[in-house]
Image: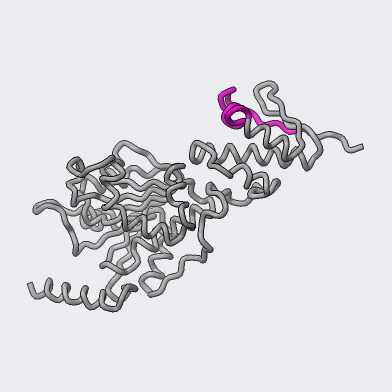
Amino acid sequence: MTRPMERSIPLENREEAARLFGTYDRNLKQIKKSTGAQVVLRNGSIVIRGARAQVESAHAAFKRIREILEARGQLAEGDLDQILAGDRTPGRDDEPSSYVPTGTFRRFADVEARTDGQATYVEDLDKNDIVFAIGPAGTGKTFLAVAKGVEYLRKGEVRRMVLVRPAVEAGERLGFLPGDIQAKVNPYLRPIYDSLNSFLEFGQLQRLIDNDVIEIVPLAFMRGRTLDEAFIILDEAQNTTIDQMKMFLTRMGGKSKIVITGDITQVDLPAGKVSGLIDARELLRGIPGIAFTYLTKADIVRHPLVQRIVDAYEQRRQRR
């Protein structure tokens, strides 16, 4: 007869047990039913007893629940079903843990650069914790940053993505626009939504936003925060002031990466205001761990007319 095995999971307090067990012990009941293991609370620990396979499966399930709760505060519908179906194989703790359920992402290929400038950009994203990408419209600054952020999220290298834009056209106050805050900022953040939807299955973006795995916010709402284990993107950074850029950069927490994108030829700040992106380019140059990637019209990958439009504006600017 096979000898029963026992493993325990230490708890900080009884409240943690309640969170792991779920409302009305729903998670506990599902794990016991699925694995056949016996589970009890004893001496401040969850004690799991049964045959080896039963115990390992139940232990892995509770561990994965804890990871998800720490990452986004709650289980989404279907998460536990996927865990128990093998989304997290027991005994493979050396693999990176994804904080997003399977079926969230579209069939995903590695980020591919289409120009030499983009290849340098992607390489800088992998090698540095802070990357500034400066260049004209259509060069893939935001799209490649979002693609790399989704890749890091998919692999479990970060817990969340935070995407930020200065709503400078609305004066950063937004009060005169109708609706709640989401309705007010939505027009200014729409380009980021479009990039994200390129990598997510239909309907998944809102689910990730609801679970705080992805956050899309105006720059003005970043003050006072510290973001750990996050992939953070500041888009349209040419429209930040010096103080705003300093505030944003100092939000960076442990195990995080920051990407700042912008076009210094399209500054929309009031006259007399210095762009925080232009200032940072001079101030932070040469600091280890910070890279500046410069994309040009040769890196434009939109419709061929976009490059001609950029050329026309650039020629007029030079004549002036």
The quadrant in which the C terminus is found is bottom left
Compared to residue 305, the image places residue 32 above or below, namely: above
Residue shown at the point (58%, 37%) measured from the top left: 66
Q: Position of residue 130 (x, y in %)?
A: 37, 54
Q: Nearer the viewer, residue 306 or 26?
A: 26
Q: What stretch is highlighted in magenta?
A: 6-25
Q: Which residue lies furthest to the top in this view?
A: 43
Q: Which of 282 and 181 is in front in this view?
A: 181
Q: How many labels does the image show?
A: 0
Q: Position of residue 34 (x, y in %)?
A: 72, 40
In-image side of 253 versus 53 (left or right): left
Residue 304 inside the magenta-drawn segment = no
Residue 14 inside the magenta-drawn segment = yes
Residue shown at the point (45%, 69%) measured from the top left: 112
Residue shown at the point (71%, 26%) measured from the top left: 40
Quadrant in the picture for residue 305: bottom left
Compared to residue 317, the image places residue 53 above or below, namely: above
In-image side of 265 versus 99 (left or right): left
Residue shown at the point (58%, 44%) measured from the top left: 79
Quadrant in the picture for residue 316: bottom left
Q: Where is residue 3 in the image (x, y as percent from the top left)?
A: 87, 35
Compared to residue 302, the image places residue 82 above or below, namely: above
